[in-house]
């Protein structure tokens, strides 16, 4: 059974930093595109950052220059370094892995990790 497990969330003051991790198991991690999403209370889930299987990154405008997505295929782990955190970054952060393997598409989600930024 495929697993994506996020960790690294917590409570931090505005201006602080957190590093989220997404550990994958039982899947072809290196072939997968990875995305970090977040969902604040009462709002829809939105994509924050993504990284392709080739390492190309993209970011939502709201986090550009503050967040950095990366991956370590040897460790089957993706990261989201978050600097300069703002109260509006408060949300549950989810890791997503998707791709295509043996002609079949796949799309997996982690359980989420809470990030709370106090003002």
Image: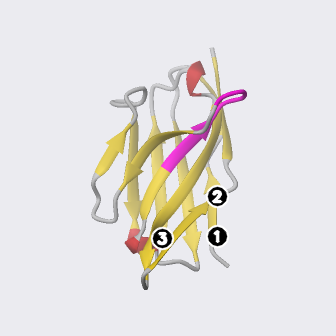
Q: Residue at x 63, y 28 (%)?
A: 90
CA gap, disc 1 and disc 3: 11 Å
Q: How many residues crowd mark 2 within 10 Å: few (<14), some (14–19), many (20+)?
A: many
Q: Which mark is residue 76?
A: 3
Which residue reaches farthest top? 119
Q: Which mark is residue 3?
A: 1
Q: Residue at x 42, y 43 (%)?
A: 49
- The reply to whether discs 1 and 2 touch (Cβ–Cβ < 8 Å) is yes
Name the residue tied to disc 2: 110
Task: Identify the element where label 1 is drawn.
Answer: strand
Q: Residue at x 72, y 27 (%)?
A: 42
Residue 50 screen position, x and y as percent: 40, 49
Q: Closest to the observer: 48 or 78?
A: 48
Residue 2 screen position, x and y as percent: 63, 74
| Residue 118 placement: quadrant | top right
Task: Identify the element where label 2 is drawn.
Answer: loop
Compared with residue 119, is residue 66 higher up or lower down, i.e. above or below?
below
Picture quarter with the N terminus: bottom right
Which circle's residue, 2 or 3, is located before the other in the chain? 3
Task: Identify the element where label 3 is drawn.
Answer: loop
Picture quarter with the C terminus: top right
Q: Identify the magenta region.
A: 36-43
CA gap, disc 2 and disc 3: 14 Å
Q: Residue at x 45, y 25 (%)?
A: 84
Q: Is residue 110 left or right of residue 84?
A: right
């Amino acid at each position: 059974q495929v697993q994506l497990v996020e960790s690294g969330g917590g409570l931090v003051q505005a201006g602080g930093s957190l590093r989220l991790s997404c550990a994958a198991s039982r899947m072809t991690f290196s072939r997968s595109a990875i995305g970090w999403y977040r969902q604040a209370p009462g709002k829809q889930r939105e994509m924050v950052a993504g990284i392709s299987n080739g390492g190309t990154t993209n970011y939502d405008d709201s986090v550009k220059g503050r967040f950095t997505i990366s991956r370590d295929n040897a460790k089957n782990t993706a990261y989201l370094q978050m600097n300069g955190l703002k109260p509006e970054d408060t949300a549950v952060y989810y890791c997503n892995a998707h791709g295509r393997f043996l002609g079949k598409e796949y799309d997996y989600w982690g359980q989420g990790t809470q990030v709370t930024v106090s003002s």
